[in-house]
């Protein structure tokens, strides 16, 4: 299973409320693009690249900082959908 991990470190630099929205959006996008059998999005402890203006997300083996509800769709499209070229053809987006 390909994993998307969203930092939910309590009291960490990643803003927990933003991170929860980011995680929920990843989960929705996974469903909408028919990837539930191949991709999972889960909360994670600190990923070691703390940044205050959003959440740190690990996609596969790569880390991305500053992920927010405003850019999560872009991040998903660029770094998850591109790995699964057949995805999304019957879903939204
Ligand atoms: S608190 Fe989120 S990466 Fe460290």
Image: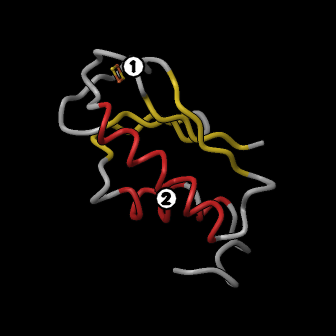
For numbered disc 2, what is the local secondary structure?
helix
Of mark 2 and mark 1, the one earlier in the sequence is 1
Tell me if the residue at label 1 has its CB under 8 Å from ligand 1.
Answer: yes
**Mark 2 Cα shell of 10 Å, populated few (<14), some (14-19), many (≥20):** some
- Name the residue at 58% across, 41% down: 4
| Viewer-nearest residue: 20 or 70 | 20
- Give the mark count: 2
Mark 2 close to ligand 1, CB under 8 Å: no
Q: Is residue 18 above or below residue 12?
A: below
Q: Nearer the viewer, residue 85 or 8?
A: 8
Q: Quadrant of residue 16?
A: top left
10 and 92: which is toward the camera: 10
Q: Is residue 4 left or right of residue 78?
A: right
Residue 10 picture quarter? top left
Residue for point 81% across, 55% down: 37
Instruction: Give left or right: position of 85 versus 29.
Output: right
Residue that numbered label 1 is attached to: 9
- Tag 1, which secondary structure? loop
Residue indicated by mark 2: 76
Q: Residue at x 42, y 26 (%)?
A: 8
Q: Quadrant of the N terminus?
A: top right
Q: Position of residue 3 (x, y in %)?
A: 65, 40
CA distance separating discs 2 and 1: 21 Å
Q: Position of residue 65 (x, y in %)?
A: 32, 37
Residue 12 place in picture, x, y as percent: 29, 17
């Amino acid at each position: 299973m390909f994993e998307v991990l969203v930092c939910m470190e309590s009291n960490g630099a990643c803003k927990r409320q933003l991170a929860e929205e980011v995680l929920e959006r990843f989960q929705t996008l996974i469903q909408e693009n028919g990837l539930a059998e191949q991709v999972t999005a889960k909360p994670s402890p600190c990923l070691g690249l703390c940044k205050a203006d959003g959440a740190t997300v690990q996609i596969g083996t790569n880390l991305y900082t500053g992920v927010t509800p405003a850019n999560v769709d872009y991040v998903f499209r660029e770094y998850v959908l591109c790995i699964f070229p057949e995805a999304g053809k019957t879903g939204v987006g």
